[in-house]
């Protein structure tokens, strides 16, 4: 390569650097997308890990969320209840970047403006979501499903070439025990009961070490025994992860939640302990008075 070519290459590189820097300095959406996502860098020094303020969502003029505000502390296990159509799933869609609000703020910690990120980036920032229907890979075994979830974690993928190291195997063993599937490790996921599939999916989410885990009606369709075990599982996760659980099963909500938020017509009706909200006249009315 001639010195001329070297020189022009170096100039081109410098121009590109300057361009990248000025784009970064301009702020706004483009700059946020250009920032690398660093998992674990959530600033909770102000005592909140998830913060929604005055969020509004419209679908063809219909307001599914009308000024929803929510404040979740790190390690908290928050239950969200409310009648059908209250906006619970829409709220989760807004947090995970699936639906864009017309108005309002959504922050992870005090510094990460989630409205600047797209769905996969929000997941990479440490927000895991369990949908209502389990989505495990049915032909694969329980162990293989967990292995895949672990390999989906970029830090793990970078540190190993296809085969799990001893530390990862150990971690999967612990996860298997946590989700009550130790004896089912070699079984095809398709042969599990509905409840077991839900646990497997929770295990797959946990393999990626989410800071915040959002669960939409996790015990719907479960047997009483499965519901009870799921309550125990979520109680074990509390503290280490922040959990936001949307659920209709009041026995389950009473068993797990530190604090219950009642949504109605796209906004918070009231918040408090299970006992407090359960004897609130307005709550009784929205559940029974329709
Ligand atoms: N994609 C959509 N398009 C139009 N309307 C929607 C859409 N998603 C939800 N809605 C409406 O918004 C309201 C809130 O829905 P949702 O968040 O699913 O309630 P919940 O989970 O509390 O039952 C409902 O009236 C629902 O019909
Ligand atoms: Mg819903």
Image (cartoon, grey):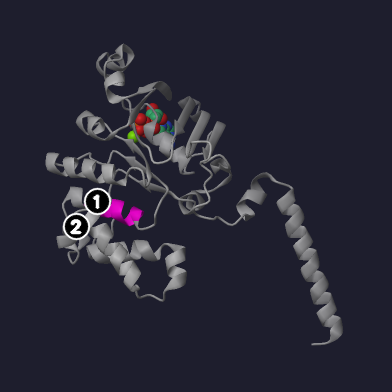
Q: Bin the neighbour count of mark 1 within 10 Å (Cα to Cα): few under 14, some 14-19, many 20 and up.
A: many
Camera-nearest residue between 57 and 163 = 163
Mark 1 vs ligand 2: CB below 8 Å? no
Residue 59 coordinates in the image, percent (x, y) = 48, 31
Looking at the rendered structure, the secondary structure element under dot 2 is: loop
Mark 2 lies on residue: 181
Q: Residue at x 41, y 51 (%)?
A: 210
Per the rendering, the mark at residue 87 is none
Task: Magenta stretch: give its range.
Answer: 197-206
Looking at the rendered structure, the secondary structure element under dot 1 is: helix
Residue 102 appears in the picture as rendered:
no
Q: In what quadrant does ligand 1 lie? A: top left
The quadrant of the picture occupied by the C terminus is top left
Mark 1 lies on residue: 199
Residue 154 coordinates in the image, percent (x, y) = 46, 64
Q: Residue at x 76, y 64 (%)?
A: 16
């Amino acid at each position: 390569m001639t010195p001329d070519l070297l020189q022009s290459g170096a100039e081109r590189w410098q121009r590109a650097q300057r361009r990248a820097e000025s784009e970064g300095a301009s702020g706004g959406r483009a700059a946020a997308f250009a920032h690398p996502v660093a998992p674990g860098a959530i600033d909770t020094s102000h005592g909140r890990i998830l913060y929604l303020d005055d969020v509004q969502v419209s679908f063809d003029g219909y307001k599914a969320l009308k000024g929803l505000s929510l404040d979740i502390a790190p390690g908290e296990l928050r239950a969200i209840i409310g009648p059908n159509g209250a906006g619970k799933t829409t709220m989760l869609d807004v947090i995970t970047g699936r639906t864009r609000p017309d108005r309002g703020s959504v922050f992870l910690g005090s510094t990460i403006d989630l409205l600047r990120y797209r769905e996969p980036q929000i997941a990479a920032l440490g927000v895991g979501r369990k949908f209502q229907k389990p989505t495990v890979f049915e032909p694969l075994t329980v162990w293989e499903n967990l292995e895949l979830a672990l390999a989906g974690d970029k830090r793990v993928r970078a540190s190993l070439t296809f085969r799990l190291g001893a530390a990862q195997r150990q971690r999967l063993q612990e996860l298997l025990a946590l989700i009550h599937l130790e004896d089912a490790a070699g079984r095809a996921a398709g042969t599990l009961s509905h409840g077991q599939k839900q646990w497997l999916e929770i295990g797959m989410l946990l393999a990626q070490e989410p800071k915040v885990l959002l669960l939409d009606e996790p015990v719907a369709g479960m047997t009483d025994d499965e519901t009870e075990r799921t309550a125990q599982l979520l109680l074990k996760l509390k503290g280490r992860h922040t959990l936001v659980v949307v659920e209709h099963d009041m026995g389950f909500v009473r068993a797990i939640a530190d604090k219950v938020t009642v949504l109605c017509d796209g906004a918070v009706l009231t918040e408090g302990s299970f006992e407090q909200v359960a004897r609130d006249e307005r709550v009784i009315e929205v559940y029974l008075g329709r």
